[in-house]
Amino acid sequence: MSLFRQLDKVRAAQARVAAHRAELATPAAALLARGQRHPALMLGAAGGAGFLLGSLDASPLRVPGLESLLRGGLAEAVAQGVRLFATLGADAADDASA
């Protein structure tokens, strides 16, 4: 493989990373803002996730097959669930204060 082909691949990868970073900037900023408005909710979600992972009593990467699940989309599903939980909790808190 020539040096120019490798440089083209690197530039293409850098462009993809920049595009994905721009896509994630808005939701990440919104999640951080919710965390600042409702710190107890975020702390509770983080504590619950930590308790759940700690109750497994093993490092997640030492459990056979779990590393491939984490790479295969389970982490994204958990992140979506936490974001949904945070959104519903923030909406409920907003409704209660209104």
Image (spheres, helix red, strand yellow):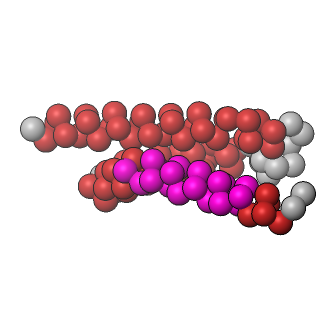
- Which residue is depicted at the point 23% across and 40% down? 93
Question: Where, by quadrant of the figure, is residue 49 drawn?
Answer: top right
- Which residue is depicted at the point 39% across and 47% down? 27
Task: Using residue 91 as the reference point, say whether residue 56 is left or right of it.
Answer: right
**The N terminus - image quarter:** bottom right
Q: Is residue 70 rendered magenta in the image?
A: no
Our reading of the magenta stretch's main secondary structure is: helix
Q: Nearer the viewer, residue 96 or 61?
A: 61
Is residue 84 visible to the viewer in this orientation of the structure?
yes
Residue 31 vs 86, above or below: the answer is below
Question: Where, by quadrant of the figure, is residue 86 drawn?
Answer: top left
Is residue 31 visible to the viewer in this orientation of the structure?
no
**The C terminus - image quarter:** top left
Q: Which residues are magenta?
A: 8-26
Task: Using residue 70 as the reference point, say whether residue 46 is left or right of it.
Answer: left
Q: Is residue 17 rendered magenta in the image?
A: yes
Label total for image: 0
- Which residue is depicted at the point 59% across and 51% down? 16
Question: Where, by quadrant of the figure, is residue 2 drawn?
Answer: bottom right
Residue 89 vs 59, above or below: the answer is above
The percent position of residue 19, horizontal first and vertical second, equals 51, 51
Kindly give the residue lying farthest to the left in the view shown: 98
Q: Nearer the viewer, residue 71 or 91?
A: 71
- Which residue is depicted at the point 31% across and 56% down? 33
The percent position of residue 48, horizontal first and vertical second, equals 53, 45
Task: Using residue 43 as the reference point, say whether residue 61 is left or right of it.
Answer: right
The percent position of residue 30, horizontal first and vertical second, equals 33, 50
